[in-house]
Amino acid sequence: MGQEGSPSMKVLTLLNPLAGSGRALRIFKRIRKFLSSLNSKIVILKPSKPIKKVFSKLDIPDYFVVIGGDGTVRSVIEAMIYCNHVDSIIVPYLGGSGGELSHYAGILTPKDLEIAFSAGIMRKIDVFKASVRLSNGEEKELVFAANLQIGHFALGIKETPAFFKRLFGSVGYMHGVLKAVIKRVNKDARVQAENFFFSGKIYTIHFGNVSTTRGGVPVAPLARPNDGKIDMMLAKAIGRIEALKTLPRVLRGEHLSHPAVVYKQFSGRVVIELENDHVAIDGEYLGLAKKVEIEFLNKVKILCRPNKG
């Protein structure tokens, strides 16, 4: 690209100071000088103010540098789509505890960020819409670009204390994962999609647009974020002992051959009916849900480091 600080290139940095329990704020200080060289304006996001409202007052830039976790990136993408600003390029910089889109883009360090801007490699990634009906009657319509999880994986997010994420980053999720093994009760689920139907008890369901979760665990190893498909890894009902025995295989991405695992890729709508089961989207726990519908929504642009993505 070779345009650092060029007036023709507008860069806006969105910082979530609460991401990673404060990690994003510490990381921001390491790249502040480089952002200044880009003449980037800095906007600090506030939990009390929806990003959509922030967008309504912005001079939309060429690049959004997003410092936070996947939840922050998800919120920015959602605002971009619903405010019709999909021509901007997202630069996901790891500031949370997972950061799957940052891993995909290869932007994890200050040097990665400089190289990415210098090379100027842009790729389009898929974005999906999730309509969620919670057990309390509340309905949510959200977008996601990394993953949506049901059952054990979502419960693991719920059971991970914030200070574990702050101290250990993505490794801190293992506390919640192991705690969820003890607490998890297999529940009924119905999954309907193109030429596919499942009805029975499940341990977990993972829908992945990227191959990893929790900072690099290859739960959906075949997922590609630009193929217009959502990958589903469904694990049928298993017990606690089997879950613990299988966990090392999941960490290595070798679990697809397990007899309880069903792995599918869908390009159309997927409807999941649940028995009040745990749901999380892009690392954010939503609560117990009765129904989830997933469908392709749009594509957005993402800046990548060379040889990544």
Image (cartoon, rainbow, N blue to C red):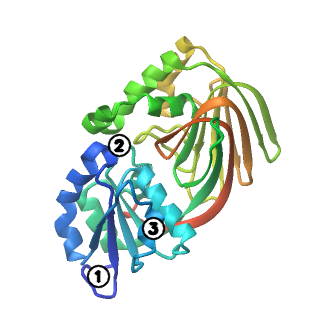
Q: Residue at x 50, y 65 (%)?
A: 79
* Left or right: where 71 falls relative to 111: right
Could you tell me residue 304's position as x and y percent? 40, 64
Q: Amino acid at mark 2?
A: Ser
Q: Residue at x 67, y 23 (%)?
A: 187
Could you classify mark 3 by the number of other residues whose Cα lies within 10 Å: few (under 14), some (14-19), or many (20 or more)?
Answer: few
- Mark closest to the chain's N terminus, 1 or 2: 1
Placement of the N terminus among the 4 image quadrants: bottom left
Could you tell me residue 211's position as x and y percent? 52, 45
Q: What residue is shown with label 2?
A: 97
Numbered disc in front, either 1 or 2: 2
Q: Amino acid at mark 3?
A: Lys
Numbered disc in front, either 1 or 3: 3
Q: Is residue 282 above or below residue 250?
A: below
Q: Secondary structure at mark 3?
A: helix
Q: Amino acid at mark 1?
A: Gln
| The quadrant where residue 11 appears | bottom left
Could you tell me residue 198's position as x and y percent? 78, 33
Q: What residue is shown with label 1?
A: 3
Question: Residue 53, which numbered label?
Answer: 3
| The quadrant where residue 61 appears | bottom left
Could you classify mark 2 by the number of other residues whose Cα lies within 10 Å: few (under 14), some (14-19), or many (20 or more)?
Answer: many
Q: Residue at x 27, y 85 (%)?
A: 6
- Mark closest to the chain's N terminus, 2 or 3: 3
